[in-house]
């Protein structure tokens, strides 16, 4: 069983994303007075009167021959197929349009319950204008105001009234969440589609096509994963559009929401400075990290190509030398079946806890190999080492004087811990504290 799932559909610029954000209680979908800003379908969870629900925002539906608009309409149709109840959004200011009528006709063919919401009814005088929307044949129109938050409770009450009887809540505490991060056009959306085996995210050769972070769950070998496809992160100086700025913010937040981050590189283009910057975001956030080299099928190779590329990565990404590397192809699906197992391995290390007795055995051996440093006649003494948290694994070293702990010796201790325990793919942190 699952939570109630609702999809919000309608033509462009009627306020779908504003209502989506109102329901989920956060600014997840990009909101801007510009048609077509939301391109893919966006998932989030909301709550109303203690009841959980999944909410899907969609791109504005238009009926024309443009290929990109056809893909957006296809995304909306998939969302409608996944939903238990559909909210059709209209706009009182423009009245009933030809596109509204076409969408209503499409919805009647789905056999799904539909709630008709008329947005931008910002004052009582406008309520009389909603009666024209009865012509859509979708039942009673509900007046709402996304900008003022009016009427949202009324449509949610109707949504739950129309919900199937067998909807129950899921507990996804065991779900492993991972995010694909990288520069625009490295193939993140194609990887999502290849992993899931369906056209889940709009794929285009136009850099920056995916502007929103998109969550989808899937299962592999009994383990549930949640995959987060993020907007390509551009250099700060090259972020011109306001929507692009929101996309970068959203990608950064996706890193925070994920437990494991897959840094996607483009094998055709090699390593760019921005790749290292993006990996640095995930490292600084303390997330598990894997390096995924995509488009590996497109380059000419010999027996030394993979080793040379690996050596280049290790040289350029020294700060995440703990990250495993995998060479894949979204096009041919090369090695993609290995990804879930590797992600689960990194996730396990990300949550690994080591007994204090074992840690202090490692500490004694480390000091024997490389004695603690001295400064101005004072010698660093490390009395005890203990793990205080996971996600990422964090250790506290109790010493006689914090100022005597040099970062190089701290790194030495980190390396000794890694040699003794499997922390592949996860950063580890050492905090120095004076013993009281």
Image: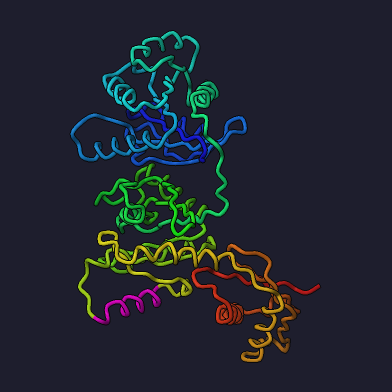
Residue 358 position by quadrant: bottom right
Q: Residue at x 70, y 75 (%)?
A: 356
Q: Is residue 15 visible?
A: yes
**What's drawn in magenta, residue-wise?**
303-316
Q: Residue furthest front?
A: 166
Q: Where 99 falls versus 4 (above or below)?
A: above
Is residue 343 depicted above or below 33 in this figure? below
| Residue pictured at 72% horizontal, 81% vertical | 382
Direction from residue 141 to residue 101 in the image, left or right: left
Measured from the top left, where is residue 363 in percent x and y? 67, 83
Residue at x-position 36% and y-position 50% = 239
Q: Quadrant of residue 277?
A: bottom left
Q: Nearer the viewer, residue 348 or 275?
A: 348
Image coordinates of residue 154 in percent, x first then y, are 53, 21
The answer to whether residue 48 is magenta is no
Q: Is residue 311 one of those drawn in magenta?
A: yes
Please state the horizontal and vertical placement of residue 383, each as a whole percent of the image.
75, 80
């Amino acid at each position: 069983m699952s939570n109630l799932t609702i999809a919000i559909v309608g033509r462009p610029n009627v306020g779908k994303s504003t209502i989506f954000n109102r329901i989920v209680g956060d600014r997840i979908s990009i909101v801007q007075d510009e048609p077509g800003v939301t391109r893919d379908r966006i998932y989030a969870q909301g709550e109303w009167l203690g009841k959980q629900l999944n909410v899907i925002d969609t791109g504005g539906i238009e009926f024309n021959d443009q290929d990109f608009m056809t893909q957006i309409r296809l995304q909306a149709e998939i969302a409608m197929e996944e939903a238990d109840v559909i909210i059709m959004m209209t706009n009182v200011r423009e009245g009933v349009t030809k596109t509204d009528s076409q969408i209503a006709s499409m919805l009647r063919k789905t056999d799904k319950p539909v709630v008709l919401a008329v947005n931008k009814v910002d004052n009582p005088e406008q309520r009389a204008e909603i009666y024209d929307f009865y012509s859509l044949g979708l039942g009673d129109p509900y007046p709402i105001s996304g900008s003022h938050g009016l009427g949202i409770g009324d449509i949610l009450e109707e949504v739950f009234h129309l919900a199937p009887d067998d909807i129950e809540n899921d507990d996804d505490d065991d779900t492993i969440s991972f995010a694909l991060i990288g520069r625009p056009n490295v193939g993140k959306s194609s990887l999502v589609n290849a992993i899931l085996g369906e056209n889940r995210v709009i794929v285009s050769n136009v850099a920056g096509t995916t502007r929103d972070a998109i969550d989808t769950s899937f299962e592999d070998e009994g383990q549930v994963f949640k995959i987060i496809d993020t907007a390509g992160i551009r250099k700060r100086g090259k972020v011109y559009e306001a929507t692009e700025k929101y996309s970068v913010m959203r990608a950064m937040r996706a890193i925070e929401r994920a437990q494991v981050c897959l840094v996607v590189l483009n094998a055709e283009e090699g390593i760019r400075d921005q790749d290292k910057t993006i990996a640095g975001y995930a490292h600084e956030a303390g997330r598990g990290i894997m390096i995924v080299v995509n488009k590996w099928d497109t380059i000419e190779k010999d027996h030394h190509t993979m080793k040379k590329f690996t050596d280049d990565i290790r040289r350029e990404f020294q700060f995440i030398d703990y990250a495993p590397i995998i060479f894949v192809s979204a096009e041919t699906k090369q090695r993609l079946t290995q990804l879930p197992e590797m992600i689960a391995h990194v996730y396990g290390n990300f949550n690994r806890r080591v007994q204090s007795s074992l840690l202090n055995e490692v500490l004694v051996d480390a000091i024997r190999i490389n004695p603690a440093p001295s400064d101005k006649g004072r010698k660093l003494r490390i009395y005890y080492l203990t793990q205080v948290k996971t996600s990422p694994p964090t250790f506290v070293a109790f010493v006689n004087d914090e100022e005597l702990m040099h970062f190089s010796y701290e790194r030495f201790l980190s390396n000794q811990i890694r040699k003794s325990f499997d922390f592949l793919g996860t950063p580890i942190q050492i905090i120095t504290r004076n013993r009281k």
